[in-house]
């Protein structure tokens, strides 16, 4: 999506250690035109795929998933992160490793809101190692739901998570696909 | 807002201890028509007030604030909760007590995204004791920003937080204003 790439080039900050800061327009502050465009683009990409629900994981994916839910007029379901393993029978639960925070989380979603009648679209902001999406796919499987695919704002393709998920047959759409980024700048690719 | 009141009466669950569960349409799963209507209603209420930014607190307010940001076409800024006091000079920070979780949080927002040129609209899902809104007002004050007011989805008026904030001069709009709720049901009021 051209607007996303333009904003990354104009306002993104590349820090040492391969960190791309997009706080000014995506993470800590969200640009409303970009947010609108993200919702419309996700709706366009997954039109006609039988999506019944949007599934995201708190908290950085919620705004983008809300825009997608509004554009597609489908319910939005949140998976929640817990540090403890204190989950009960009312939820589906799986463990996700956060490379950012260097720890494991339990990711849970209520059984009431994800069923075998659902076909879910996964939405998140960043795709790097893919661990969050793997967790969401697992929650959908536990519920017996189908997965239409995943839409992420920014994929760091060189970290491999997106390609691993695609190799397993998951449709993964990235609104900006970063092939590489270093002191020479950011290079976008396409699928 | 009639749609919000109707959904509370139809799908809300009143639990012992004064807990109103709205997980099926507002908290754990969000109904897209309700989400759209919330954004439009907040935009209508605060039209012409000079709002430059929407400010919310992660994570349960993000979806509603996103809908408001889309309807008003204004940037959305997140305040984040931290359990530690490990904050640095790049942020404004204040302490909020969570009655739900029985603990204090540091609530922080980057200095880059809230300035004395801003007039912010605060958005959250629930208003009970008002502690989260008090924290957001404090962050705005630290930044020298004006506060146009606050919009919440559901106010439990009998818990007093909304009236305390109004007494301090803050405009507080609630899309559903619950005067009381008990074994006899839920009674809505108006300002």
Image (spheres, coloured by chain):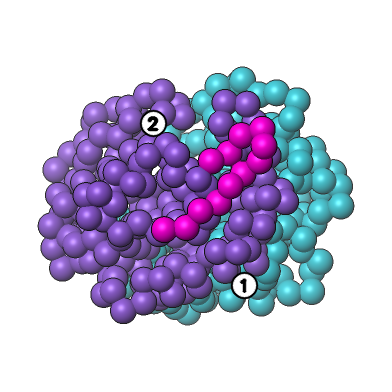
Chain colours: A cyan, B purple
Q: In which quarter of the image is residue B135?
A: top left
- Between A76 and A174, the residue placed more toward the observer is A76
Quadrant in the picture for the C terminus of chain B: bottom left
| Position of residue A17 measured from the top left corner of the image (x, y, whole percent) | 33, 46
What separation in Å lies between label 2 and label 1 (alpha carbons)? Answer: 33 Å
Task: Name the quarter where the N terminus of chain B is drawn.
Answer: bottom right
Q: Which of B182 and A135 is in front in this view?
A: B182
A129 vs B56, left or right, is: right
Residue B134's spot in the image, x, y percent?
Answer: 28, 44
Quarter of the view holding residue A150: bottom right
Above or below A146: residue B180: above
The residue depicted at 73 percent of the width and 34 percent of the height is A92
Mark linked to residue B98: 2
Badge 2 marks a residue whose secondary structure is strand
Determine the image quadrant of residue A6.
bottom left
Which residue range is magenta in the image? B180-191
Depicted A44 relative to depicted A87: above or below: below
């Amino acid at each position: 999506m051209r607007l996303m790439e333009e904003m990354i080039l104009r306002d993104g900050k590349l820090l040492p250690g391969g960190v791309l800061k997009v706080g000014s327009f995506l993470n800590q502050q969200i640009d409303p035109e970009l947010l609108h465009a993200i919702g419309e683009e996700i709706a366009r990409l997954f039109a006609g795929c039988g999506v019944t629900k949007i599934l995201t994981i708190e908290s950085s994916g919620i705004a983008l998933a809300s825009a997608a839910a509004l554009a597609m007029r489908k319910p939005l379901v949140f998976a929640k992160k817990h540090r403890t393993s204190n989950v009960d029978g009312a939820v589906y639960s799986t463990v996700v490793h956060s490379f950012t925070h260097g720890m494991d989380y339990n990711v849970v979603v209520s059984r009431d809101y994800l069923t075998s009648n659902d076909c879910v679209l996964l939405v998140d902001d960043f795709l790097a190692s893919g661990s969050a999406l793997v967790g969401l796919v697992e929650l959908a499987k536990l519920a017996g739901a189908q997965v239409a695919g995943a839409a992420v704002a920014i994929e760091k393709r060189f970290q491999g998570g997106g390609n691993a998920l695609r190799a397993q047959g998951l449709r993964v759409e990235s609104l900006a696909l970063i092939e590489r980024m270093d002191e020479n700048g950011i290079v976008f690719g396409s699928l």
